[in-house]
Amino acid sequence: MSNKKKVLVVDDNQNFSQLLQYALEDDFETYSESDGRAGVDTAIKILPDLILMDVMMPEISGIEMARILVAKEETRDIPIVVLTGSHLDKGMPALFKQERNVRFFLSKATPVMDIVEIVKRILSVD
């Protein structure tokens, strides 16, 4: 059994998901799903310490996923970092930040190692 904290990556872009997992795997136990519904199911099953997720996904969107997780007692306090490759309207980050568990809203253009540092900071991992 690993003592590493668990990070769930939920993104339908398999290449980006694999890149994130590769960057995180030295410090974290990583899991991935390619759509929002599977992301919710896996989050409930493994209770990750943090979730990295996309905005636009099959089945259910990122905002729906965040709201479902907040509504469930066992997942409501899991921090979420939202990553998007879309050029969305200016109100999208504000919409996500209204959700109590969303800590950051970042562009997928953010350097991967910066994303890893944000994850480490949120989870207090050196």
Image: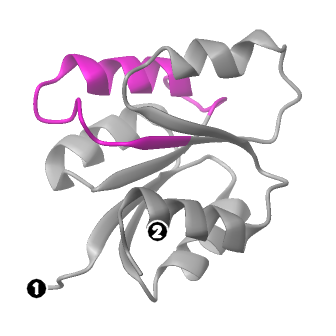
Q: In the rendering, at what x and y percent does residue 35 appear?
A: 50, 39
| SS at mark 2 in the image | helix
Query: In the image, 25: left or right of 96?
Result: left
User: Which residue in the structure is indicated by mark 2?
Assistant: 120
Residue 57 can be seen, yes or no: yes
Residue drawn at (58%, 30%), measured in percent from left and top?
A: 58
- Mark 1 element type: loop
Q: Is residue 84 above or below residue 92?
A: below
Give the mark nearer the N terminus: 2 vs 1.
1
- Percent x, y for residue 21? 54, 73
Kind of residue at disc 1: Met
**Residue that protrudes farthest toward the right in the picture:** 87
Tell me the residue at 26%/55% (across/down).
Answer: 48
Q: Quadrant of residue 88?
A: top right
Q: Quadrant of the C terminus?
A: bottom left
Between residue 13 and residue 88, name the one nearer to us: 88
Q: Quick one: 107 or 8, which is closer to the camera?
A: 107
Q: Amino acid at mark 2?
A: Lys
Task: Indicate whether residue 37 is drawn in magenta.
Answer: no
Mark 1 burial class by Cα count in 10 Å: few <14, some 14-19, many 20+: few
Which quarter of the figure has residue 79? Answer: top left
Q: Which residue is mark 1?
A: 1
Magenta segment: 55-81
Measuring 49% from the left and 38% from the top, which residue is drawn there? 103
